[in-house]
Image (cartoon, rainbow, N blue to C red):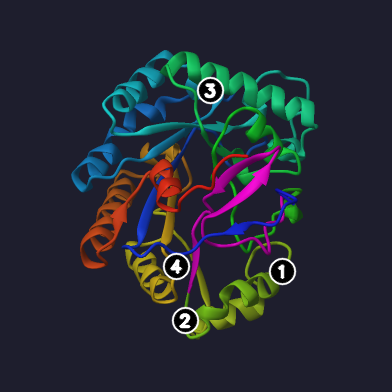
Amino acid sequence: MFHENQPIRTRAPEKAPCLIVVIDTEEEFDWGAPFDRNSRSVTCIRHQHKAQDIFHRYGIVPTYVVDYAVAEDETAVGILREWAEAGTCLIGAHLHPWVNPPYEEEVNRHNSYPGNLPYGLEKAKLERLTDLITTRFGQRPVIYKAGRYGAGKNTARILAELGYEIDASVVADTDFSHDQGPDFRGLPTQPYFFQAAGKTLLELPNARGYDGLLAGWGSVLYPRLAGQSGVRSLMAGVLSKLRLLERIPLTPEGISAADQIRMVRRMARLGHFAFHYAYHSSSLMVGGSPYVCTEGELQDFLNNMEEFFDFFLNDLGGEALTPLQMRDRLALPLQP
C-alpha cells in the first residue's frame, strides 16, 4: 500500500470542475526495450513549446515533473526555467531510478518502480534529484510523481521527510502487481489528504474515468473485471463494446478528444470535481514515444489537446488549477 493511514476524503468544492495538468518530463527511450542507464537523451524538451503555446492560450499553468536526465541537461533546464520564472509553469520531481544516482541497484523491471527500492536507496535517489532541481531551478520542488506510478510502502514517508506537499503517483482502481508494481485498488479516485511522518500531504490521483450505463459503479466493477493484469478481460471488453462500462484515461496519448469529453461529461454528472490530465514529454517529438510516430500523429495529438481544453474550459465551464491551487481550494488541514 502506498500509505498506511486512512485517506482523509475531501468534499467537492462548490465551484466549477477543475483541470490539473501534470507532464512526465523525462528522457526519450525505447518503450519496448530493457531499461538502460545510458538512454538519457532529452531532445524532446525542445519540442515542449508546441503544447506550452496551447496552455498559454487557455490560461493553463502545467506542472512539469522532471527527472534526473532532464534536470542535469543545461538546454532542457534553460527552456523550462524560463517558463517557470515567467509563472507559466510549475516544476516538480519525477523519479526514474535507472537514470538517477546513486546507482546501487540492478537495472531491471522490479527496480524500475522506485517504491520497490529499499527505504534508504529510494530516499537517497529522491534527495539527489530534489537537490539538483533546487540548484537548477532556484526553487525546491514540492510536487512529486513517481516514475511508472511506482509509489511504494516507504514513498509517503520519504516525501514528507524531504518537504514534499503533493503527490500525483496514484492511478486509482489499478493494480500493477502483475509487473511487480503497486496496487492502488481501493484508494479514492478524487483528490484526498493523507498523513505521513506527522505531516499532511495531498494526493492527486491520475484520472481514469468511466462511461456507459454502469459508470457509477466503475470503481467497484472495473478492477474486478480487468483482473490483476490491469488489462481488460473478455467480460470487460464485452461491457465496453455494449457501452455498459468503459474505462477511459484522461490523456491525449492514444485517446481521442471525443472519448475524453464523453468520459468527463459522465464523471462530472456523477459528482467528480477534479480531473488530472497527463502525458509524457516525449510524445511532443515525432518518434519520441509510441503515441506519436509521424508528423500527422503529432498534429492530431495537439489538436486533441486543444479540442479537449476548449470543451473543458468553455463548454463544461471548468477552470484550470495548479496542484498548489487545488490544495488551497480543498482547504489543507493545519500541519501538526
Say whether residue 15 is left or right of residue 96. Answer: left
Q: Secondary structure at mark 4?
A: loop
Residue bearing the label numbered 4: 272
Residue nearest the viewer, comparing 64 with 304? 64
Q: Tell which tag, 4 or 2, sits nearer the viewer.
A: 4
Whether residue 113 is visible to the viewer of this picture, yes or no, is no
Q: Is residue 213 above or below residue 333?
A: below
Amino acid beneath label 2: Gly
Quadrant assignment for the C terminus: top right
Mark sitting on residue 91: none
Q: Is residue 189 above or below residue 64?
A: below
Q: Position of residue 151 (x, y in %)?
A: 67, 43
Say whether residue 186 is left or right of residue 206. Answer: right
Q: Position of residue 271 (x, y in %)?
A: 43, 72
Residue bearing the label numbered 1: 227
* Residue found 35% across the figure and 22% down from its top: 81
Residues at marks 4 and 3, CA–CA distance in whole angstroms:
35 Å
> Image quadrant of residue 218?
bottom right
Q: Secondary structure at mark 2?
A: loop
- Residues in magenta, as a range: 182-210
Q: Earlier in the sequence, mark 4 or mark 3?
A: 3
Residue bearing the label numbered 2: 212
Asked whether the beta carbons under mark 2 and mark 1 sit within 8 Å of each other, the answer is no
Whether residue 192 is visible to the viewer of this picture, yes or no, is yes
Mark 4 packing: few (<14 Cα in 10 Å), some, or many (20+)? some
Q: Earlier in the sequence, mark 3 or mark 1?
A: 3
Q: Position of residue 179 (x, y in %)?
A: 73, 50
Q: Earlier in the sequence, mark 1 or mark 4?
A: 1
